């Protein structure tokens, strides 16, 4: 009874692993792996150093699987902050994923709900950026799913191995080396690959300034401020045809 | 925070990850998306990444770093320069860490 679906899914997995797009997805993610691996290691160490037991830390790495949200939540957990504060902070740090998911919808919308939700759950920043670069047209195309699954497998595997190592070797890993900076460097490269025309440059500059200026806001809300300012700047840069630009400009004229 | 609370917090954080990453994948029907929102999607992901990265590089304990003698600043500039030149992410990480580690470990920046 149980063995047949099991055998079927093993066969499906074997077929998937032979798919050329699956291998391409794995290959395209490999350059990001060192940065993510170092970041995973540091996150693993950070969980134990902030007072979580090994079992709780393992639970966190496998259930949460979101490095920046974990690092934002840990000091709050250590300080005994109320749960809703921790959850809200993590959600704000994760807001970019909400934005990504709007785009995932164009590619994955035709899949059964459970399947697309589970794929979304394990698809991080790097998966998103690489996928969008490979498939810029927002519509489903053959080969996309194996490509995405290959990338998810590489990222998930690399991250979890290093995070578990960090949890187990927390007392040996030299924290003062600042190895987690490799994760920031990987995100710098990732941002670079999203920069294109002048409007995206201006928009990114506005995001940087707004994030620093609004950094003192609680619950990491500076990210929300930065996104709002950057989107407004980008749309204004698009010129007179912009549907946000027109009402904004005419109201500025009216104010004069 | 005792271990029951920690476990509960972590399970909640898992739900937060799921909700955020699958936000627009959850509804059964496609949500109508105004054209303005569609165009905002071009700028929003980059802005969110920048808003996470830049404070990590230029701020310490909630204030701008007062000096240029900081390993993060110089390494981030070197990494960004490398990316602009060669556009490879692996090289960006390698160059950044090659600049960062000697400054951090050797000079204590």
Image (cartoon, coloured by chain):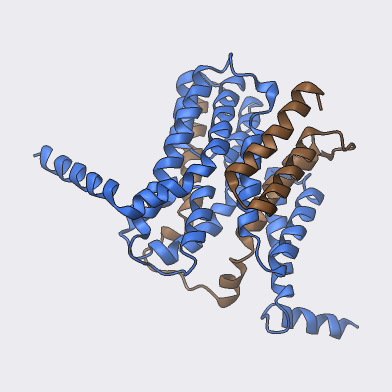
Give the camera-side residue of A174 and A107: A174
Farthest left residue in view: A1
Q: Percent x, y for residue A160?
A: 45, 32
Tell me which residue sits at (59%, 46%) in the image.
B89
Q: Is residue A219 above or below residue A249?
A: above
Farthest front residue in view: B86
Tell me which residue sits at (74%, 43%) in the image.
B78
Tell me which residue sits at (50%, 47%) in the image.
A124
Task: State which chain is coloured brown.
Answer: B
Q: Percent x, y for residue A111?
A: 32, 61
Give the camera-side residue of B67 and B60: B67
Q: Percent x, y for residue A230?
A: 71, 62
Residue A156 appears in which quarter of the rendering?
top left
Q: Is residue A12 above or below residue A162?
A: below
Quarter of the figure with the N terminus of chain B: top right
Chain A's colour? blue
């Amino acid at each position: 009874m149980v063995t047949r679906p099991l055998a079927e899914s093993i066969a499906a997995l074997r077929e998937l692993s032979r798919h050329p797009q699956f291998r391409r997805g794995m290959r395209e993610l490999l350059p990001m792996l060192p940065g993510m691996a170092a970041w995973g290691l540091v996150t693993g160490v950070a969980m134990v150093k902030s007072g979580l037991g090994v079992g709780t830390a393992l639970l966190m790495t496998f259930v949460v699987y979101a490095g920046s949200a974990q690092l934002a939540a840990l000091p709050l957990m250590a300080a005994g902050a109320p749960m809703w504060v921790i959850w809200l902070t993590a959600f704000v740090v994760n807001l970019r994923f909400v934005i990504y998911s709007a785009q995932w919808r164009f590619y994955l919308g035709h899949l059964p709900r459970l399947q697309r939700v589970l794929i979304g759950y394990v698809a991080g920043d790097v998966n998103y950026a690489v996928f969008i670069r490979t498939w810029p047209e927002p519509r489903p195309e053959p080969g996309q799913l194996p490509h995405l699954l290959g990338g998810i497998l590489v990222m998930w595997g690399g991250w979890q191995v290093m995070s578990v190592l960090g949890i187990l070797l927390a007392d040996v890993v030299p924290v003062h080396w600042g190895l987690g900076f490799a994760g920031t460097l990987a995100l710098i490269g990732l941002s670079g690959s999203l920069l294109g025309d002048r409007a995206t440059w201006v928009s990114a500059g506005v995001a940087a300034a707004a994030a620093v200026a609004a950094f003192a806001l609680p619950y990491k809300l500076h990210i929300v401020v930065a996104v709002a300012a950057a989107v407004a700047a980008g749309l204004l840069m698009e010129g007179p045809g912009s549907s946000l630009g027109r009402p904004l400009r005419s109201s500025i004229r009216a104010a004069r | 925070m005792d271990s029951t609370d920690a476990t509960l917090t972590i399970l909640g954080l898992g739900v937060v990850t799921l909700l955020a990453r699958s936000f627009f994948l959850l509804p059964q029907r496609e949500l109508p998306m105004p054209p303005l929102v569609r165009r905002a999607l071009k700028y929003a992901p980059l802005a969110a990444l920048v808003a996470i990265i830049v404070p990590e590089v230029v701020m310490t304990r909630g204030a701008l770093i007062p000096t240029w003698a900081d390993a993060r600043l110089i390494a981030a500039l070197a990494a960004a320069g490398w990316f602009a030149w060669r556009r490879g992410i692996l090289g960006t990480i390698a160059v950044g860490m090659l600049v960062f580690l000697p400054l951090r470990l050797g000079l204590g920046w």
